[in-house]
Image (cartoon, grey):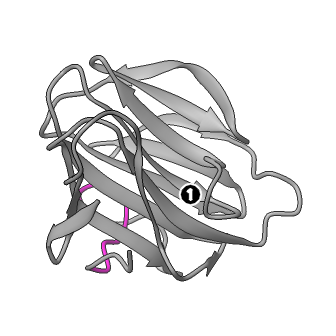
Amino acid sequence: MTFTNSNSIKKVASGIGASKATTSESYPYDSTFVSGRINVHASSDMNIGLSIDGTALTYALSFQGGSAYAYYNGGFISSVTTYTASDIFSIVAQSSGVYMYKNGVQIYTNSLISGTSALKGLFNIYTQNDIIDKIAFGYTKQGLTGSQGFQEIGRAHV
């Protein structure tokens, strides 16, 4: 996987199997977020998420066959919404819980996992040439603001 510009990632290797990008920095769980727009076709398989260890999907959204599924504590939850290539999704961890948004509208919430202290951004792409762009990841005390339900701070540190 590679950056195609300063704020997007694309799988460049051929064949099946995941390409994974993890942020090098961890952020305190209180008001940590990850966001991104999926630029895909309906059969795509990719994930965006927050991870305690940089490997497992602690809090995540998985995009498969036109449906978006929530992950919580590594477990797969049922479908929470559908998606198109123009949708922007975000996941926010706050002291009050974990919240997932589609185009600024909340689609899923759950409690924080006990013992969580820091989180990394995690991006998986399975299908050749699919892209996650408009990526933002970080930590903000400003709360959930902005047109997409999060405070975008710019380029991801992937």
Judging from the image, what secondary structure is the residue with disc 1 in? strand
Q: Is residue 139 above or below residue 135?
A: below
**Label 1: how many Cα within 10 Å (few below 14, some 14–19, many 20+):** many
Q: Is residue 71 magenta?
A: no
Asked whether the viewer can see residue 149, the reply is: no
Q: Is residue 35 left or right of residue 66?
A: right
Q: Is residue 27 above or below residue 83?
A: below
Residue plotted at (61% across, 47% down)? 57
Residue plotted at (37% across, 63% down)? 150
Nearest to the observer: residue 147 or residue 27:
27
Q: Is residue 94 left or right of residue 68?
A: right
Residue 68, image x, y percentages: 39, 26
Q: Is residue 153 above or below residue 17?
A: below
Q: Is residue 150 magenta?
A: yes
Residue 106, image x, y percentages: 44, 39
Q: Amino acid at mark 1?
A: Leu
Task: Please identify the residue farthest to the right as the structure is shown.
Answer: 115
Residue plotted at (55% across, 69% down)? 32
Magenta segment: 146-154
Q: Which quadrant, please, contains the N terminus?
A: bottom left
Asked whether the viewer can see residue 67, the reply is: yes
**Within the image, what quadrant is residue 12 found in?**
bottom left
**Within the image, what quadrant is residue 34 found in?**
bottom left
Reading the image, the residue beneath label 1 is 50
Residue 55, image x, y percentages: 62, 56
Q: Is residue 54 left or right of residue 130?
A: right
